[in-house]
Amino acid sequence: GDKVKQSPSALSLQEGTNSALRCNFSIAATTVQWFLQNPRGSLINLFYLVPGTKENGRLKSAFDSKESYSTLHIRDAQLEDSGTYFCAAEGPNTNKVVFGTGTRLQVLP
Amino acid sequence: NAGVIQTPRHKVTGKGQEATLWCEPISGHSAVFWYRQTIVQGLEFLTYFRNQAPIDDSGMPKERFSAQMPNQSHSTLKIQSTQPQDSAVYLCASSSDRVAEQFFGPGTRLTVL
């Protein structure tokens, strides 16, 4: 089932613009991870979050466990940001994570 | 730190043959996870081990699939009598005791003809 819903499913951005990706959870998520899957297929760790926010360069992420969602903000998008972004939620009493369906991002020059 | 190592990177088998996929977790990590990625199903959890003990195999197909972790430095995923629908990228991840953040290997692309 759709325990982790990601939106949008696809997105095109002009270089230098900003955007936000979102994950909504129907499970009681305790932690959230965000990954970028590059064109070679490798999953690159972006953020690991307990409830709260983190920032790393042009990326910022927030996780609200009470409202059951997480966001990933991309500022000043660059061509190398292109790829598929996945969020993954860890439920209570388990270490396995449930992945969202991904957001395919294309940054255009 | 070499990260999670998976071998082979690509494997092609004929229908009915056996496939064994290998994963070497990051040194010192106590948990190893297996996932499968397809276009249709996305990223699906298969099974995981902690300190070499199987913890949760709820995502494993009931037949033909098995996973083992004989020592702390490697885990294997074995698929017997492979079928075309087993074609996928199989991903292995590991995490430490202190922090549950998972780090993924490059995956093994299995193609069953």
Image: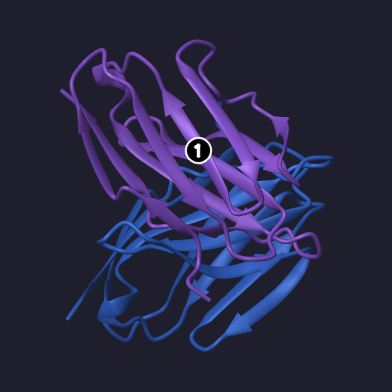
| Quadrant the C terminus of chain B occupies | top left
For the residue pair A28 and A46, the one nearer the viewer reads as: A46
For chain A, what colour was chosen? Answer: blue
Residue A3 visible in the snapshot: no
The residue under the point 52% across, 67% down is: A45
Subunit that carries the residue with mark 1: B
Which chain did the image draw in purple? Answer: B
Query: What percent of the width, then of the height, locates residue A109?
Result: 17, 81
Query: What percent of the width, then of the height, locates residue A106?
Result: 26, 66
The residue under the point 33% across, 30% down is: B40
The residue under the point 50% across, 60% down is: B4
Query: What percent of the width, then of the height, locates residue B75?
Result: 55, 43
**Mark 1: secondary structure:** strand
Q: Which residue is mark 1?
A: B76
For the residue pair A38 and B89, the one nearer the viewer reads as: B89
Q: Amino acid at mark 1?
A: Thr
Q: Residue furthest front?
A: B71
